[in-house]
Image (cartoon, rainbow, N blue to C red):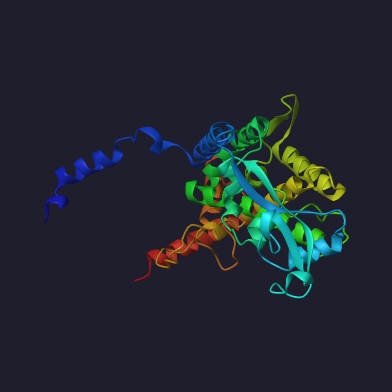
Amino acid sequence: MGIHDRDYARDQAGARRARPRMGLAVWSVNTWLIVLCTVVFIVNNIVLSQPGALRTFSYGVEFYPSVSLAEQRRAVRATRDPLPYPGVNGIVYYPLVDPMAPAMLRKEIGRERRALMPVLTGLGHFSTTQGFFGLEVWRFVTFQFLHQNLAHLLLNMLGLYFVGSIVEQYLGPRRYAAFYLACGIFGALLYLLLNLLGYVFSLNLPFVLFNDPSTPLVGASAGIFGVLMAAAFISPREEVLIFWVIPVQLRVAVYLFATIAAVNLFAGSANAGGEAAHVGGAIAGFYLIRRSHLLRDFFDITGDSRRAPVVRGASGVGGDSELDRVLAKIRTEGRAALTERELRVLREATAARGGRDGGS
């Protein structure tokens, strides 16, 4: 028998494990998200926004008035580079034949659009030009931690503060982080899709985006709309105060906000691009909170398949997070309060556990 098998060794090891952790290690993922967004805002919008710290970034083309919209779209489609064939002194050309054509066969269409920006905004904002045509895929994530101004930050962080902990307790820290980032990514994807359909392919529908594909998109709103949809699923009858005055159920408030975003998108409001991201995040949140097992491998870039599978029955219902919710409901409301679907989740989990315990 080795030393680690002796009683006193096990007792000491258990005491070490039971000792509470101190400091930042005990922060929730939701707290970390709020802190990270706040720190990024302070660094980017205050420290790096000082006149001497700003940097010049290129973010597309300012087309001449004589260049038709159809020709602008052809220029954007012609290359994945953010600038269609830039020349000297910021002049941008569109080759009428091919990129290697002599100067006489090129048409001058505009000038490179340049602007002073904080470094993190310039490198991290999302746009169709940079994120898609420029293949700068990190922008699908980094834009979620940037904010335009203090009001923008405060509104988003208040939403995360009030409902994020509900969703994190339901999903667990790892899946909550995956859920939040995935909703933000889907917000950028819907923005991208509608911008491509409107600006590049000229599809004349009320919800597509005809705005400049170089328009920057920043903010945590897409991920937060996903978190709101998840909270409405987990605690639908929780009472909240809209504008700190009107008491309504959480699901009513959340679906109202999502409907307003969708209406603004269809109406082509001034912030239609932002509303597209909100709707994309809400759709992702609605879908993923009901299929949280899809988030299990979000951070698994190594493809390790040795982990135990999530317990799910033949009907495909009930991931481990849903089982936890059913068990919590039994503790608070009793087994009689379970729905037929919840009873099926419990039966399948019980059967699967029995099969594992009786196996070799």
On the image, the x and y values in percent for residue 281 come to: 67, 50
Depth check, front residue: 47 or 23? 47
At a point 69% along the width and 32% down the height, the residue shown is 239
The residue at the far top in this view is 245
Q: Could you tell me which quadrant the C terminus lies in? A: bottom left
Depth check, front residue: 64 or 187? 64
- Regarding residue 59, the answer to whether it shows in the image is yes
At a point 61% along the width and 54% down the height, the residue shown is 140
- Regarding residue 187, the answer to whether it shows in the image is no
On the image, the x and y values in percent for residue 340 come to: 65, 55
On the image, the x and y values in percent for residue 347 come to: 54, 59
Q: Is residue 154 above or below residue 96?
A: above
Depth check, front residue: 186 or 142? 142
At a point 80% along the width and 42% down the height, the residue shown is 260
Q: Is residue 25 above or below residue 89?
A: above
On the image, the x and y values in percent for residue 177 come to: 52, 48
